[in-house]
Image (cartoon, rainbow, N blue to C red):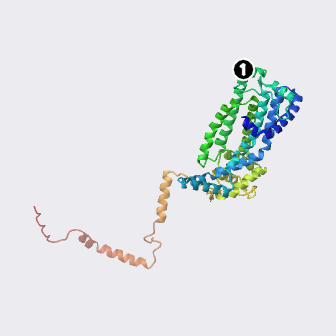
Amino acid sequence: MDTIASLFSFITTPVSWVIVQFHSVYGALFGPDTGWAWGLSIVSLVILIRICLIPLFVKQIKSTRAMQTLQPEMKKIQERYKNDKQRQSEEMMKLYKETGTNPLSSCLPILAQSPFFFALYHVLNSIATGDTIGVINQSLLQSAQKAHIVGAPLAAKFTDSASKVEALGASLTDVRVVTAIMIVLMSASQFFTQRQLMTKNVDTTVKTPFMQQQKMLMYVFPVMFAVFGINFPVGVLVYWLTTNVWTMGQQMYVIHNNPTPGSKAQASYLERLDKHVSQHSKVGRRRDRAIVKAIVAKGRDRNEFERKFINGLSKAGLVAQADGTVVKGDASAAVETEDGTPATATPKRQQPKRQSKSQRHSGAAKAAGEAEPKTSLSKSDEPEDAKPAAAAQKGGAKSGGGRSKAQSGQRKGPQRPKSPSKK
């Protein structure tokens, strides 16, 4: 570790100076030799560093989302050139260049705060060994050695011997209990931070190897913190626990207000936004307008949650505009189907009224009577000149009735004998 510390010696003096400045403030409140003064100085150092790293954190979020968007294309390249690793690397670099994506951007916050971490470790290690460092003189060194956090000195470690811990004015049991609790909290906060990233802020519509890697890191990082944590001084554990809690809170804020498209967090966010916009008929915050603007610009490329949001606005009589605002519209406006195409709402089919059996029979008979054509003229409808002809026709039929009857029966006279049946 001495070699690594020497590489970051250029930043040891600034880190020690910041700690001393915060200690002068908290020392006036809690006493210069108390663990509160030195512990809060370390916490304040973490907060100051993380505030300075916010631009890098924003860049990390954008890079991570860009990498998630490129995962399908990267998978196609891997499958196309699976037997040619060189061509695969060339196509990957070409894809990164065309999209302006840098895979290392997601590691920027960790890389940026690494010098401060090693500088703080070297400062606390020098306090434990009784060596002055940076702007920490002999009087400040003695004050820091007397400072205890819940009975554990700032410079004590879990692996220290009993004699070394007693030299710092503490017991080995207190040091190990305090460090064990802080290591567990540090690992748990790291696990929860990675878990909420995987379960809430990942696009569930794309299944890629990147997601499997993130799941693996969710379990690897806490184990690494537990293994390396036993070699960290209490002051470094305070530093790392504070930065983990800061990262967890910062990520919760980002997931709640600016979630990844297609994730469960986006579904919850758009549901809240839909309820707010439907109630107030406007998009209030500039951040919300930017998200609505991005959704409108996607058009047919919207995901399931974004289409549901647009349809919810349509049902409320609102229409999203290209600038992210909403205006009053027709409540019966067209809504989008699952594939993004507009589909107008069809009127609900009205079921016919149920009729009794007698009503159905009478209706059928009436319809049949109306549909049957008239085949003969009624008596009143017959013309006057047709009546004598009808009477003559009737008389002729009467006079020839016997003949008709004889023709309809058997013939008179001798009958022709029937031929014998063949046996």
Question: x, y percentage for residue 390?
Answer: 39, 76
Can residue 63 be seen by looking at this rendering? yes
Pick whichever, 387 or 212, lies toward us.
Answer: 212
- Disc 1 marks which residue? 162
Pick whichever, 360 or 385, lies toward us.
Answer: 360
| Residue, far right | 28
- Against 245, residue 392 (above or below) is below
| Residue, far bottom | 385
Within 10 Å of disc 1 (Cα), the crowding (few <14, some 14-19, many 20+) is few
Q: Residue at x 48, y 58 (%)?
A: 364
Pick whichever, 364 or 325, lies toward us.
Answer: 325
Image quadrant holding the N terminus, namely: top right
Pick whichever, 22 or 373, lies toward us.
Answer: 22
- Secondary structure under tag 1 reads helix
Question: Total marks drawn?
Answer: 1
Question: x, y percentage for residue 55?
Answer: 77, 47
Quarter of the figure with residue 157: top right
Q: Residue at x 61, y 41 (%)?
A: 215
Mark 1: which amino acid?
A: Ala
Can residue 244 be seen by looking at this rendering? no
Would you say 39 lies left or right of 373 here?
right
Quarter of the figure with residue 202: top right
Would you say 280 lies left or right of 191 here?
right
Question: x, y percentage for residue 264?
Answer: 65, 45
Image quadrant holding the C terminus, namely: bottom left
Q: Residue at x 10, y 65 (%)?
A: 420
